[in-house]
Amino acid sequence: MSRKYFGTDGIRGRIGKHPMTPDFALRLGWAAGKVLSQGSNPLVVIGKDTRISGYMLESALQAGLVAAGVNIRLVGPMPTPAVAYLTRTFRASAGIVISASHNPYYDNGIKFFSANGTKLDDTVEEEIERHLEMDVQTVDSLNLGKAVRVDDAAGRYIEFCKRTLPARVSLKGLRIVVDCANGATYHVAPDVFRELGAEVIAINDEPDGVNINKECGATSLGSLQEAVKIYRANVGIALDGDGDRLMMVDEQGEVVDGDEIIAIIAKHRKDKNKLKGDVVGTLMSNLGLEKAMKSIGVGFRRANVGDRYVMEELRECGGIIGGENSGHIIARDRIETGDGIVAALQVLNAMIDTQFTLYDLKQIMIKYPQVLVNVPIKEKIDLDESDDIQQSVKDVEAELGVRGRVLLRASGTEPLIRVMVEGEEMAEIKVLADRIANVVRKTAA
């Protein structure tokens, strides 16, 4: 069964347009309640980010779950990884997060966690979609679910984050700028670093329902770079709207992306003899990350784009560190999902332990220039079946040899073929990327 509503990270869309409507959310709550609730007194944890539409979707989901006989714990605005953690803490059947992550305020989404705090398997999402086609049937009044608001959810998560550092580690002496993206971390992230001893300057920590991710956070680093320079901070930390993505800025004001963060954490774990299995990136991970891991004797694997696929690959190889260059970082020995705050703490731990600056630590990885060309298409193209496209890729790969790589993939959200070429020289890879893109254009014409 192909999934109609679920994408790589739950269900997402523009508010007021199907499927981000109150009636759909109610039916989704009921369908999820039927599929995910286990045994007697089933329980689901619901959290959200700071979008104004979160109230509407929360109420609708709540109604559907209650109608299915499911009890609810409402934790309010809370990072996505916090909901994963609280789902396990409360021994709940599932967790639900109302968030569109790094998207603007007018979008929203609904994503689910299993009882173990992990993303749902495709088969479970397909079963929920099957129930969405059914009529909502309310259980007997005696068996209706109840909703309870959890007042200490933020404090529970803050303490969890702090415990991901060794007990002896203090952040005293570090000046940190934390960009909360006016999102779900606004009331937890600054306190985590502050309670560990750091001097914290919080920015973009005043959400109003519509300013989430607006020219701030992990997708827009300009204000953080400026703040790091103004306050002469040791490091800048940028989270996205729901707190599962991390980008950083070093003391010189330079951006440190997800690939570099993965390299730093993996090397520190390796130096401490605490790294297990291979490191996992994605098809879009920079070639420099792969070479950096090879240089320290660590295996490297590439998963499909999406943190759920990174997690699947980590489980398969027994690895503990992986993620995406966009900032989804997974440290499985700390939490079974991407967590921006936890990932930042692992980098800070490496800084404290080695007495190196963030700029020094990121030198483990030399980033290769990347060129991405998006080729519009009218109809779907089978890239594997086109001899001309495949030959153009082989020719470029032969020309690059070990100095670079080529990636062709169809966009999962737009009618585009993405042509990506990496190499040592920007001028060279621009020419090579355009060469492949022109062949794709001819094939698509």
Image (tube, rainbow, N blue to C red):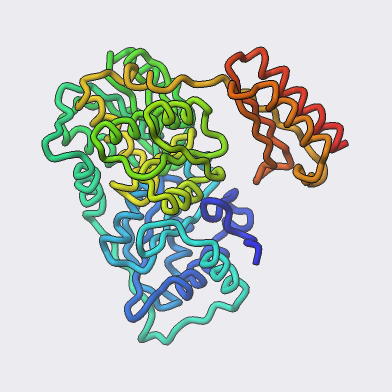
Would residue 244 be visible to someone looking at this image?
A: no
Residue 279, given in percent of the width and then of the height, sits at 41, 39
Q: Quadrant of residue 392?
A: top right
Residue 56, given in percent of the width and then of the height, sits at 47, 57
Quarter of the image for the N terminus: give it.
bottom right
Q: Nearer the viewer, residue 334 or 79?
A: 334
Left or right: 169, with 75 as reference point: left
Residue positioned 33% across, 33% down in the render: 265
Quarter of the image for the C terminus: give it.
top right
Q: Is residue 132 depicted above or below 17 in this figure?
A: below
Residue 35, given in percent of the width and then of the height, sits at 48, 73
Residue positioned 30% across, 34% down in the render: 270
Left or right: 374, with 105 as reference point: right
Would residue 274 be visible to someone looking at this image?
A: yes
Left or right: 419, with 356 as reference point: right
Residue positioned 27% across, 35% down in the render: 345
Q: Is residue 381 depicted above or below 406 in this figure?
A: below
Left or right: 32, with 334 as reference point: right
Q: Nearer the viewer, residue 350 or 24?
A: 350
Q: Quadrant of residue 86?
A: bottom left
Residue 320, given in percent of the width and then of the height, sits at 35, 45
Q: Quadrant of residue 22?
A: bottom right
Residue positioned 26% across, 34% down in the render: 190
Q: Nearer the viewer, residue 154 or 341?
A: 341
Q: Is residue 95 depicted above or below 411 in this figure?
A: below
